[in-house]
Image (cartoon, rainbow, N blue to C red):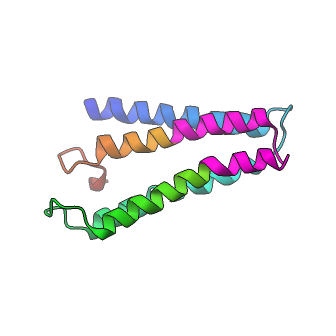
Amino acid sequence: MAGIKALISLSFGGAIGLMFLMLGCALPVYNAYWPLFLLFFYILSPIPYCISRRVVDDTDSASNACKELAIFLTTGIVVSAFGLPIIFARADVIAWGACALVLTGNIVIFTTILGFFLVFGSNDDFSWQQW
């Protein structure tokens, strides 16, 4: 039952994060849809870690190069997702208020993605790898 509560909480967090992103785009004051490019970063961010979990044997307690590379690439994607709205705002493509809403959405979405891997990332009975 704890897994269902976690799944519902993560769904709610994802919906709130996407709401902030849409508010930053669609409010009549801002009316610029350039921040929707961040959806690519949301999709790309878990991919390196998922690939490394499939490739890497977890029996070794020491860290290995594949896992470290996956964490490095994921960090680069997340930092880029935070930098893109700031660059848009500095170039006057979007307003600073829209930038704040998008950055708030980034925090919520990436926290939700992190929470997903913390809750469902272990190899116990209730794992996301069974889906």
Q: Is residue 107 left or right of residue 54?
A: right
Identify the main secondary structure in magenta. Answer: helix
Count of numbered circles in the view = 0
Q: Is residue 103 magenta?
A: yes
- Magenta residue span: 82-109
Q: Position of residue 2 (x, y in %)?
A: 26, 30
Task: Give the answer, above or below, for where 78 lies relative to 102.
Answer: below
Which quarter of the figure has residue 119? top left
Residue found at x 32% / y 69%: 66
Task: Give the answer, above or below, for where 96 lies relative to 122.
Answer: above
Residue found at x 56% / y 51%: 79
- Regarding residue 7, the answer to whether it shows in the image is yes
Where the N terminus falls, by quadrant? Answer: top left
Q: Position of residue 73 (x, y in %)?
A: 46, 62
Residue found at x 32% / y 42%: 118
Q: Is residue 9 magenta?
A: no
Residue toward you, 92 or 10 = 92
Q: Is residue 77 left or right of residue 9?
A: right
Q: Position of residue 72 (x, y in %)?
A: 43, 61
Q: Position of residue 60 (x, y in %)?
A: 15, 64
Task: Give the answer, above or below, for where 17 lies relative to 71.
Answer: above
- Regarding residue 33, the answer to whether it shows in the image is no
Residue found at x 32% / y 33%: 4
Q: Is residue 109 left or right of residue 48?
A: right
